[in-house]
């Protein structure tokens, strides 16, 4: 194909040689060289075109250039691999034979489309060129052949526009402006109102735009057009939107895009022609009804681009009943064949139906669940296939309130989708105000630079949380997910002024008391109020979860600190609590005063008096949680954060604290200064507090076991699991365990009863993982705190790493954010080692995970594969983990 070589598509040198690989696969005339099982090589579109051809479905013939050719194109510095040019020429001639027409021939012209198609569907992300092969001579031949002058000029102007934009990067607006000006000048609204002469003039102007922008004439040689278009499709694999789509959908390991060169069929040949897109089932609701849209006298991009308002598919039945019946039969056949909901593109050329594409259709989570369950009822698929059909992470859409999709929204900022859901409320800038306003019945959004444990009350009172700093596992994100609160974190476009009580974003200034809305599923911030609609858990959802529960081996627990969270998690299927953080209990009401009194104490006796005030409060908390969990295990982590987090750090609040506690403000300031640490995450916290101040853990142990005994007296079964945090040596654990067992014996003697219990540790320090065997001599269970374990293994601060992690992922240094999905190579190796060493010593060692990774599907699969007993996650992630755990079992079977 000599003219292709001239266009800059010269084949690569023999440094790759003629690999012997077949680069081009033909389909047409009821026969095809490929099939549906070749998506990796032919892309989804090419494989399905071949499959439909084999099924005898009317598909315009063509050929597919493989994804391997695309990969070699990049390896060779954007040159074609040896042999591709010859194969393309051979298959083009074969296409001419199949169509009885010739490429570039004036008398009997063949026009083609050039479309992308990766192995994984990426709708609209890569490029397409239609009507390729037209020039000034061919358009005249097309007029004579079709006896439709308007159609020929319409096809030509579309081709110049698409080629100019896709191949030469001329902005769409350059062409659209001319078309709009023409319609305005003629006083018409629609493209179809333009006459042949009007379109001929548009073509002339389009060519001038092309020449002005590129400094060259529009190419008249169809083979040059074709080679340039093939290159453009290859190049579109790495365009910004395709790369972003792959990043967002975690698509990795693909060779590139295939290129499909296919004979054109025309939906723009007049009132007997049209084009459309349809789905074998409703992609929004999952209802088993034929759903779609079409346009008369149009080409495919008109439907997708919204240039004209399409008609509902039902109207096709009245307009072209025979075509509708044929399309309906094909819809049923394709769905039975692929055993999944199909997204179908079709064209009607002068009353004749052609299919241009079928693929498994994108769908909402609600639709995915319904379709999966109903296809089992219909006998199309089995339960195991149904379980694998639904993306676990998509279940978030079903569990949280969502904004009404019909309502218009004014987006002013975008951050990280830290906790899904939808929330609308008045802006407040501190946690105290959030509680006060909420107490008066106001719905509020708490806006902060970042949150801290001290903000817990305000976070609970708020409808949603917005922060300008922090990542997906920041305090705001973790706590919000645990509460089921909507949260947008790391919204760097936010400029917050606490003193003046306003923030600026997207050109808007929002003051305290003014409304904003947050979409925690998208990470978007909207100005004003947007109404929400409650998500409903359908019977289909419950049925799918039941099938998942029958399949999975991992137990699924929840991270919950309150009875309310525990009850919510139970409704979502939690089988216990894997992490109950006791520190959050100390911020409520009078508790913070007693806690601060303990911190300010100078002697052990003073600390014990203060802790004595906290004891009944903690005991009541545990009683309520045990009651809510009703016989399911509850893992309670003893105090973990450093003591300075319970003290105020600004002067005004310190003075307020001093006044309430009837002490000097100077004493408060001195204590805050004394507790200051340069790196609190690695400082005086966790078990180190228990070693330094054993009375703290003594009080908490007593509260837990007194609560357990009290519940036993009420006839409620309890399974307490006491967890010591931040252990790094076996001696730390053994010392604290001895103290705890002493307290437990005292409680049993006082209560004249006993309760089964276990004492274990959170493995969150690399050293603890390495000496897992020694720690397991005393510890009865391990719970991996993978948030901190990830921080300490990588040496990353999870609250600060957001500033560079994105760049690391883009550069391929990391595949994923290790705080969102467990790093199986490094952190995972430590986890696996600790489990193996621990079980050598204690065969019945119970092992779980309680970091944020417990709700990440990929991390859940890892937990299954390394033999954990359970995963624990925030309440709203429990169904996600249940489904992911079932899928992990099924994937291991295949």
Image (spheres, rainbow, N blue to C red):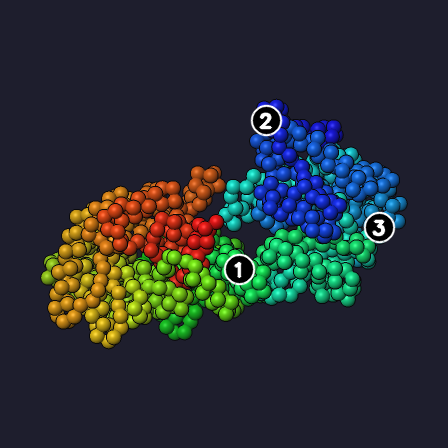
Q: Quadrant of residue 650?
A: bottom left
The label on residue 150 is 3
Q: Residue furthest top?
A: 14
Disc 2 secondary structure class = loop
Please state which of residues 240 and 233 is positioned toward the viewer in this rendering.
233
Give the alpha-carbon distance from disc 3 to disc 1, as whole Å.
52 Å
Residue tagged 1: 382
**Earlier along the polypeptide chain: callout 3 or callout 2?**
2
**Earlier along the polypeptide chain: callout 1 or callout 2?**
2
Q: Residues within 10 Å of mark 1 (few under 14, many from 20)?
A: some
Residue tagged 2: 16
Q: In which quarter of the image is residue 608?
A: bottom left
Residue 511 position, x and y percent, is: 45, 62
Tell me if residue 247 comes above or below residue 444 in the rendering: above
Position of the N terminus by quadrant: top right
Residue placed at 65% from the left, 35% from the top? Answer: 23
Residue 569 position, x and y percent, is: 38, 66
């Amino acid at each position: 194909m000599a003219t292709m070589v001239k266009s800059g598509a010269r084949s690569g040198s023999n440094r790759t040689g003629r690999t012997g690989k077949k680069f081009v696969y033909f389909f047409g005339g009821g026969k095809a060289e490929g099939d549906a099982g070749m998506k990796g090589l032919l892309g989804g579109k090419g494989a399905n075109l071949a499959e439909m051809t084999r099924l005898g479905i009317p598909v315009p013939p063509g050929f597919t250039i493989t994804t391997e050719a695309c990969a070699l194109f990049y390896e060779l510095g954007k040159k074609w691999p040896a042999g591709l040019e010859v194969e393309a020429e051979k298959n083009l001639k074969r296409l001419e034979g199949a169509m009885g027409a010739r490429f570039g021939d004036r008398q009997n012209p063949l026009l083609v489309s050039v479309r992308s198609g990766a192995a994984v569907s990426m709708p609209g992300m890569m490029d397409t060129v239609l009507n390729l092969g037209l020039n000034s001579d061919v358009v005249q031949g097309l007029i004579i052949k079709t006896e439709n002058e308007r159609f020929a000029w319409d096809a030509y102007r579309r081709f110049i526009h698409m080629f100019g934009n896709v191949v030469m990067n001329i902005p769409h607006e350059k062409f659209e402006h001319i078309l709009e000006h023409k319609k305005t000048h003629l006083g018409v609204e629609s493209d179809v109102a333009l006459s042949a002469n009007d379109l001929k003039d548009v073509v002339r102007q389009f060519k001038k735009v092309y020449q002005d922008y590129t400094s060259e004439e529009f190419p008249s040689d169809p083979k040059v057009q074709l080679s340039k278009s093939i290159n453009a499709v290859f190049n579109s694999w790495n365009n910004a939107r395709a790369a972003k789509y792959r990043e967002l959908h975690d698509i990795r390991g693909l060779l590139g895009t295939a290129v499909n060169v296919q004979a054109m069929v025309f939906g723009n040949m007049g009132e007997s022609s049209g084009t459309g897109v349809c789905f074998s089932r409703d992609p929004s609701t999952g209802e088993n009804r034929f759903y779609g849209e079409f346009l008369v006298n149009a080409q495919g991009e008109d439907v997708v681009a919204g240039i004209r308002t399409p008609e509902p598919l039902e109207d096709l039945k009245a307009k072209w009943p025979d075509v509708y019946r044929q399309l309906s039969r094909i819809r049923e056949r394709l769905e039975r064949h692929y055993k999944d909901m199909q997204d179908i593109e079709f064209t009607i050329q002068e009353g004749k139906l052609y299919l241009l594409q079928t693929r498994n259709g994108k769908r909402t989570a609600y639709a995915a669940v319904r379709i999966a369950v109903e296809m089992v009822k219909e006998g199309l698929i089995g339960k195991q296939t149904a379980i694998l059909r639904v993306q676990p992470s998509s279940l978030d859409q079903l569990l949280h309130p969502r904004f009404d999709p019909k309502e218009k929204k004014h987006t002013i900022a975008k951050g990280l989708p830290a906790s899904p859901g939808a929330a609308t409320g008045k802006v407040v800038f501190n946690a105290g105000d959030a509680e006060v306003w909420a107490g008066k019945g106001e719905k509020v959004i708490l806006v902060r630079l970042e949150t801290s444990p001290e903000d817990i009350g305000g976070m609970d009172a708020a409808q949603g949380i917005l922060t300008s700093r922090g990542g997906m596992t920041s305090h705001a994100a973790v706590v919000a997910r645990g509460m089921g609160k909507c949260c947008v974190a790391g919204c760097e476009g936010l400029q917050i002024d606490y003193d003046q009580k306003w923030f600026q974003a997207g050109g808007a200034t929002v003051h305290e008391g003014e409304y904003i809305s947050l979409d925690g599923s998208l990470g978007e911030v909207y100005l004003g109020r947007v109404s929400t609609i409650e998500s409903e858990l359908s019977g289909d959802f419950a049925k799918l979860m039941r099938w998942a529960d029958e399949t999975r081996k991992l137990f699924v627990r929840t991270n919950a600190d309150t009875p309310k969270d525990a009850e919510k998690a139970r409704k979502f299927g939690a089988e216990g609590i894997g992490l109950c953080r006791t520190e959050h209990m100390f911020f409520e009401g009078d508790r913070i005063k007693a806690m601060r009194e303990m911190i300010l104490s100078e002697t052990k006796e003073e600390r014990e008096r203060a802790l004595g005030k906290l004891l009944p409060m903690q005991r009541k908390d545990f009683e309520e949680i045990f009651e809510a969990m009703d016989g399911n295990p509850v893992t309670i982590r003893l105090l973990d954060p450093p003591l300075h987090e319970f003290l105020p750090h600004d002067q005004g609040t310190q003075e307020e604290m001093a006044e309430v506690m009837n002490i000097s403000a100077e004493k408060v300031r001195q204590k805050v200064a004394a507790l200051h640490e340069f790196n609190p995450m690695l400082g005086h916290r966790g078990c180190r507090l228990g070693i330094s101040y054993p009375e703290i853990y003594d009080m908490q142990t007593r509260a837990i076991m007194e609560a357990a005994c009290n519940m036993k007296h009420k006839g409620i079964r309890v399974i307490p699991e006491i967890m010591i945090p931040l252990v790094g040596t076996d001696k730390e654990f053994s010392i604290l365990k001895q103290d705890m067992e002493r307290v437990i014996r005292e409680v049993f003697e006082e209560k004249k009863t006993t309760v089964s219990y276990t004492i274990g540790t959170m493995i969150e320090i690399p050293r603890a993982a390495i000496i897992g065997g020694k720690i397991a001599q005393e510890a009865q269970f391990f719970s991996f705190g993978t948030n901190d374990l990830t921080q300490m293994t990588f040496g990353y601060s999870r609250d600060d790493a957001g500033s560079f992690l994105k760049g690391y992922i883009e550069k391929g240094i990391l595949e994923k954010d290790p705080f969102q999905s467990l790093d199986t190579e490094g952190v995972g190796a430590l986890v696996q080692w600790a489990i193996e060493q621990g079980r050598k010593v204690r065969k019945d060692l119970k092992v779980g995970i309680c970091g944020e990774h417990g709700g990440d599907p990929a991390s859940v699969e890892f937990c299954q594969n390394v033999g954990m007993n359970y995963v624990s996650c925030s309440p709203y992630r429990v169904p996600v983990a249940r489904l992911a755990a079932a899928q992990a079992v099924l994937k291991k079977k295949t």
